[in-house]
Amino acid sequence: MKRFVILALTVAVAGLTASAAPAAAGVTSVRLALSPDASFPQRQFTLVLPPKVKPYNIRLTENGIPVIAHLSPIVQRRVPLSVAVLLDTSNSMRGPALSAAVDAAETLIADKPARAEAAVFGFAERPYLIHGWASSPSTFDASLAAIEPSQGTAIWDAVGLASQSVGDRDGAARALVLLTDGSDTTSAATVDEAAQAARSAQARVYVVGLPGAETNEAGLRRLVAETGGELIQVRSLSQLRRVYAGVAAELAQQYVLTYTSQLRGTGRPVTVKLNVDGQAAEVHYRIPPTSAAPAPSSTGWWTTQQALQAISAGVGLIVLLSAYLLMRPKRTSPIRRMRGYMLGGAAEGAPDVAALLPPRPRRSLPRPGPGNVWGRFAADVDRGDLKAHPVAVLLLGIAAGTAAAAVAGFAAGQPLAIAAGPIVGAVGVWVYVTHRASAWYAHFDASLPDALAVLASSLRAGHSLLQAVDHVADEADEMTAREWGEVVRQTRLGIPVEDALDEMTHRVANTDLQWISLVARVQRQIGGNMAEMFDIVATTVRDRHRLRTQVRTLTAQGRMTRWILTLAPVVLAGLMMLVSPLYISGFLNSTTGRALLGIAAVLIVIGSIWLKKIVEIEV
């Protein structure tokens, strides 16, 4: 008899353990479900981890190939979860079963994440709303206490109604928790339609079956299988509270796992395996057919044929106007025409008219600062010896940029790109003119020590200062000879050589050049050995130029670093646009992304200016 009692107790404990196992299965195992809303190659899964499993230990493979996935817990979202609780309120639930179901529903609502929302639906002959969406558990008490059972069981209609409601919510994850004790008797919908409604709402369906639900087990299993949910069969009402607490814990342990698949081939089978802390989950799917997204159709006047004709006419007008301004006959003043006839010299006894003519106008102001954009551009055009008016140079650049943009725009099917042509052309010609003028100034600075040495040698040979300057003009290269020759021409018109040198210093804006006029004035007023003074000046200028070159060499790495750090983000952004457009479009299509790009651009400009101030050392 004693052995029989022990055996009976053992069987009872085993039965209780087996009956409780389904309740705990959803909390202790890793679950991975493919979300239907992600379009290939973007893959999105819902991952459920047991409470003690660390999410950063996961290893994910796709057909054996490791993939790098992004994992984010739903509890960190603004609305982490939207869960609909469906209670069977048919007459078969009257009494303790309904009380236990209401108590279990209250447990689930109380144990959900803090910002998660819930709603309660009932179903008998037809589904109905017991309590609308809310986050506070205390608001559900009165509605749950007022439930009254009635005739009929409409399981599939209730799933459809709850799916439609949860599909309109903003939860990062969505779930339906359904409790029933029997089969569907009054639904107008089928199990397939209910499963389709849940999939459309991207909701997983958890079904808790009470004793008696076995008669509809095939349909319930089909429902949970097609939605990635779980079917939990309980043997007694006392297990309900623990089952619902386990479902709440499982819902709170959900993660959204996303990655971009590198596999291709429509219909190719794919096996996704996840391993974490010795546990594994596996999902199988086939690569769906992919179709290129249709290009967004543009609307408005700019896409019409009249717009293209107007743009073409505007481009042609700009090109013709620029060509006319460049090729039109230029007026020649009488003085210039007379200058051409006096090249052979004047008749004997007649006044030399050419000598009486004023010199060819030269720029009398130094190179303006960067703030005076147009004045600096005009000065650089003259200094670059382009032999054209600044307006003509600018128009030529605009016309060239517009023509190039027109060709590129029509070739790429983007005629609106022509609008960028004038801007690109103006910037391009400004960069070219500035570079050409800066090259002239750098060349003049480099040749000045040699010019001063020739000046000192001429003075030491017994020539006057004017003859020495004339000798420098003869020996100088073509780029700098005209400035020294201008000093000689002005001196022959009666301007003192010191004033002519001062004006040359003013034009060239070279601080080293002012030593020549200073030495000339000192020698005229006080006297002294001018050749020796010019030797000292030449040595000083040469040492300064050598030091300036050395500083520029030492700061070359800093200047190169500045340009690399400034241009690298732009180049990398362009490469990413070609390699992974979706990565950049995530920034461009959101307000936060555009704000971050703007802040990054401002910081890059500030950093570039800062580095420029550091590496530019004035000598």
Image (cartoon, grey):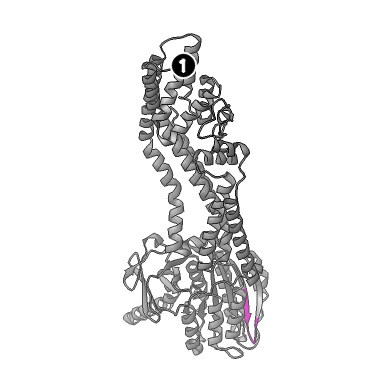
* Residue 580 appears in the rendering: yes
Q: Position of residue 67 (x, y in %)?
A: 36, 66
Residue with the most extreme front position: 348
Which image quarter is the C terminus in? top left
- Looking at the rendered image, the quarter that the N terminus falls into is bottom left
- Left or right: 334 as drawn, with respect to 205: right
Residue that badge 1 annotates: 519
Local secondary structure at mark 1: helix
Three-letter code, disc 1: Val
| Residue 579 lies in the magenta-colored region | no
Examine the rendering and report whether any part of residue 593 can be seen. no
Looking at the rendered structure, the number of numbered marks drawn on it comes to 1
- Residue in the foreground of this view, choosing between 581 and 481: 481
- The residue at 66%/66% (across/down) is 139
Front residue of 312 and 341: 341
Residue in view at x 62 percent, y 86 percent? 91
Q: Is residue 21 above or below residue 91?
A: above
Looking at the image, residue 374 lies above or below residue 259: above
Q: Is 471 placed above or below 304 here?
A: above
The residue at 50%/38% (across/down) is 383
Instruction: Give yes or no for residue 126 being in the magenta stretch.
Output: yes
Q: Where is residue 352 in the image (x, y as percent from the top left)?
A: 56, 28
Q: Which of 570 and 244 is in front in this view?
A: 570
Segment tinted magenta in the rendering: 120-127
Question: In the image shown, does 16 or 196 lie closer to the viewer?
Answer: 196
Indicate whether 488 appears above or below 439: above
Image quadrant assignment for residue 530: top left
Local crowd size for mark 1, using a 10 Å CA cut-off: few (<14), some (14–19), many (≥20):
some
- Give the x, y percent position of residue 333: 62, 40
What type of secondary structure mainly makes up the magenta span?
A: strand
